[in-house]
Amino acid sequence: MSKSGSPVQGQKTETRQPQFVESPLCRFDDLEDGHSRGFDPLSEGRDTMFIVRQGDVLYGWRNNCPHYENARMAWKKNEFLNGDRSRIVCGAHGALFDIASGQCVLGPCLGQSLTPVPLTILDGQVFLEEPYSPGLRPRPGRHHP
Amino acid sequence: MRIIGPDELVFGVDDLNACRTFLVDYGLDEENWEDGKGGTFVALDNTAITVRARDDSSLPKPLPSGSTLRQTIYGVEDASVLDEIEAELSTDREVTRDGNGAIALVDDVDMALKFQVTRRIDLDLEAELINSPGAAPLRGVNKIGALQDAPAKPRTLSHIVYFTPDMTKHEAFYVERLKFVVTDRFTNVGPFLRPQACKDHHTLFMLATPPYMQGLEHLAFHMQGPTDLMLAGSRLVQKGYESFWGPGRHKFGSNWFWYFNCPLMTHFEYDADMDIHDDDWAPREIDVSAEASQLFLFENVEKWFPGAGPKD
């Protein structure tokens, strides 16, 4: 994997810039076919992205429903899909999204799309392909971008 | 018009079993349940949430937006109020009566409503009791305030918030036809409303949205006080549910809040300690903003203790 983007800053320096994440998110085989799983690549304390596995294909999306800024989507840890697991669903207000394209097909963000998270699989491990931006709001008193 | 507030909300959902688990985890009691069909879950005063399968033919038709909310059921003081509502609304829409005398209709933006003599029972419970310097102790000597295993049950269905496609028309329906009172208003968003047989700051709030968003933004149940709210919300987090906003305290209404995502695909809020008003209250109005909407906001984190205990 090529290393691009800003290196991870020291512990005491908080950055809102995209950061390169060197370690894998998980093993490919850890992802259950047809299911979703949330991830917190920057250890912010909450899942800021999720992956849906369909057969040999993985779809990575930011955990951010476009109908509100910073709207987290799971209704429970790792639960990003509707009842029959045919769509991504937002547990906030039920918006349905095409799993492969991220397009909203019904509900509060019709016409909008999820933000993709490009993934790379190397030696059975799943990596972020690009530098990754923080997903949660900064703490009060910290720098806002 | 002596409408009390929401008695029951009826949903059509995809995953009945997940909803059943959530509603019990939220703190409601299961009143009835039938596998594959759904059931009803009640707060301490018998106000309720009912879940049915999305394709259940007994439900009012769904909104085009796909919202899971299928009917809002209001409680009124007595049967004469139902006659009054029927007389008012049957002039320009179909109003049907069921065998129990409840009346069903749609409001001016196609939200399905029902009115019934309230199913709620009177509660005789303690408020959260605090001790405050300079004031007489409320909890009293040798009474414990922090109880890890306190039941922290939702007491009563407090309020609902609609995404509404036509604010002017929707507000007019509740104010002019059902005699709701505007308590406060976010100028660029919508009004806080209370019906006449209720003093709570709001049982209904509206957010102006495009038609494809129409539905239920959230519902809330009142808790005993902020401590029960924090305790119940912490338990939901421990069970893996997704905290959406809170805990915090709103400015308009003064109620503490904590909102969660859930498998009913709307937000379930715990609220506590809401202001009450009467007709002497003069409504405030302000543009909504993060600053205007909350006094403060917190985020739940893992419990820890500074400097003691074994290191991981």
Image (spheres, coloured by chain):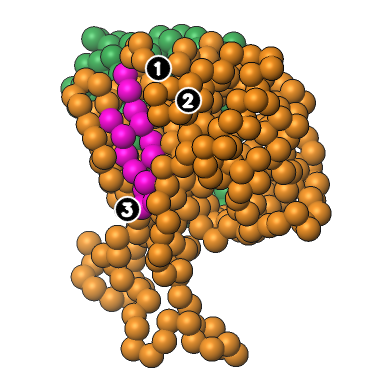
Chain colours: A green, B orange
Q: Residue B193: percent from the left, percent from the top?
A: 67, 42
SS for dot 1: loop
Q: Which mark is residue B59?
A: 1
Q: Which quadrant of the rendered structure holds the N terminus of chain B?
A: top right
Task: Tell me if I can see residue B29 in this picture.
Answer: yes
Question: Residue at position x 23%, y 67% from top?
Answer: B311
Q: Residue B107: percent from the left, percent from the top?
A: 62, 22
Which badge, 3 or 1, comes first in the chain's sequence? 1
Is residue A113 toward the left or the right of residue B13 in the image? right
Q: Residue A125: percent from the left, percent from the top?
A: 25, 25
Closer to the observer: label 3 or label 1?
Answer: 1
Snapshot quadrant of residue A128: top left
Front in this rendered view, residue A76 or A49: A76
SS for dot 2: strand
Which chain does tag 3 point to?
A: B
Q: Which quadrant of the rendered structure holds the C terminus of chain B?
A: bottom left
Q: Main secondary structure of the magenta part?
A: strand
Judge whether A34 appears above or below B142 on screen: above
Q: How far separated are the C-alphas under marks 3 and 2?
A: 29 Å
Question: Residue at position x 40%, y 51% from top?
Answer: B121
Q: Which mark is residue B306?
A: none
Q: How far separated are the C-alphas under marks 3 and 1?
A: 32 Å
Q: Residue B263: percent from the left, percent from the top?
A: 36, 30
Q: How far separated are the C-alphas under marks 2 and 1?
A: 8 Å
CB of mark 2 within 8 Å of CB of mark 1? yes
Snapshot quadrant of residue A80: top left
* Amino acid type, label 1: Leu
* Amino acid type, label 3: Arg
SS for dot 3: helix
Region rendered in magenta: B39-53
Q: Which mark is residue B71?
A: 2
Give the residue at mark 3.
B235
